[in-house]
Amino acid sequence: DYTAAAIASFAFGGSHAVLDTNVRRVLGRAVSATEFPPRSVTRAERELAESLVPDDDPALWAVAVMELGALVCTAAKPRCDACPIVEQCEWHRSGRPAYQGPPRRGQTYDGTDRQCRGRLLAVVRDSDRVVPKARLDAVWSDDAQRERALGGLLADGLVVSRPGGYALPD
């Protein structure tokens, strides 16, 4: 569901809720006052997310909420002081109640495809020009994993191929 929604939204401008872990955490906190979302996406979550996607530039909304969850409304150390929606956040207004659900599994991040994708995307995102392939090659040593991650970013429409390298989509 995530990949299909991301492609439809980012590559084709469709109005779809892109529900990754970060988005689910932001919506759970901001709307439902829950510290962490359930283990799997619920119908109620999907309906809530779909209801919040604006008609005007849904891809921008998706990226903004993903970035908010990745950089500000993080799982381990939320930075409420830097949050642009802190005044509307039900979790914050409720005193940031602790998670009351089943025990959460710790997720290994080091060395994962997700970490590789993040590193590649950060290089492209932080550049004001086309990023040469050699620059991406320098940030991850495992060739097969790096190529798989780059292929995924291209397929998801998060990065586009340009003459001389890669860039964010227009």
Image (cartoon, rainbow, N blue to C red):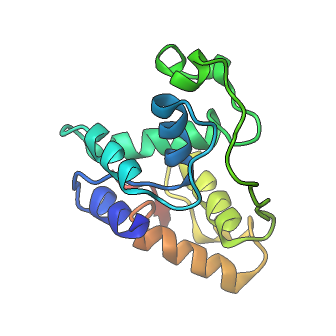
Is 132 positioned to the left or the right of 19 in the image?
right
Is 68 positioned to the left or the right of 118 in the image?
left
> For residue 169, which quarter of the picture?
bottom left
Q: How many marks?
A: 0
Q: Residue furthest left?
A: 55
Residue 70 image offset from top left, x and y in percent: 61, 44
Residue 114 image offset from top left, x and y in percent: 65, 65
Residue 61 image offset from top left, x and y in percent: 35, 40
Q: Residue furthest bottom?
A: 144
> For residue 76, which quarter of the picture?
top right
**Residue 164 visible in the snapshot:** no
**Residue 69 visible in the snapshot:** yes
Q: Nearer the viewer, residue 58 or 136?
A: 58
Q: Nearer the viewer, residue 35 or 156?
A: 35
Residue at 69% x, 31% y: name it: 78
Residue 21 image offset from top left, x and y in percent: 56, 53
Image quadrant containing the N terminus: bottom left
Q: Nearer the viewer, residue 119 or 63?
A: 63
Residue at 58% x, 23% y: name it: 83
